[in-house]
Amino acid sequence: MTIRKLHPHSRRGKRLGHFARRVLTVLLLLVIGYGLIRLGLAGRTSSWPLADCTAVASRVVPGGIFTSTLFRRPLIYIGEFQLRYMVEGREYLLWAHSGWYDADQNFIQQRVAALPATCPNRIRFNP
């Protein structure tokens, strides 16, 4: 029995090459699709329980956009609230965006100085 190698430029060799590429492409697309579906299912937070929270502090932070590298003066300031919430008897704190931002730091400080009576954000946790 003689084993013949297919010449890469022969008609049969080209057909096998195209077929192999198509199979690999389909397999790759299936793997990517499966990964995206798994990420979509893992990313659904609507079923996670909600935690009640309270705003306990506020601060004004630079927005990350600066005038130049030499002086590093912020062009925008962002107001944040520190939120406290409880999950299974443990207390957690986090900083969350208040919704206020402006170029005037004093303006933002006045807006976030009074803490909101109710929690401005919905906090969901992964049980």
Image: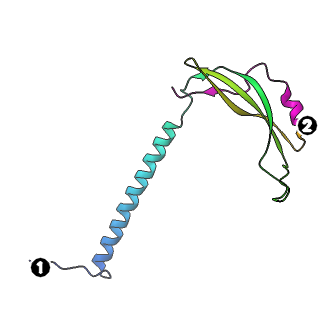
Report which residue position mark 1 lands on: 2
**Left or right relative to 27: residue 59:** right
Could you say which quadrant of the image residue 44 lies in? Answer: top right
Q: Secondary structure at mark 2?
A: helix
Q: Residue at x 33, y 71 (%)?
A: 17
Query: Where is residue 27 shown, x and y percent of the image?
Result: 37, 56
Name the residue: 49% across, 37% down: 41
Compared across the picture, whether 36 is left or right of 53 comes to left
Q: Which residue is mark 2?
A: 106
- Percent coordinates x, y for residue 39 in the rendering: 49, 42
Residue 50 place in picture, x, y as percent: 60, 22
Q: Residue furthest top?
A: 89
Q: Is residue 88 above or below residue 82?
A: above
Q: Give neighbour class at mark 1: few <14, some 14-19, many 20+ (Cα, 10 Å).
A: few
Residue 1: image location, x then y, percent: 8, 77
Quarter of the rendering containing residue 107 = top right
Q: Nearer the viewer, residue 117 or 39?
A: 117
- Magenta region: 106-127
Q: Secondary structure at mark 1?
A: loop
- Mark 1 touching mark 2, by CB under 8 A? no
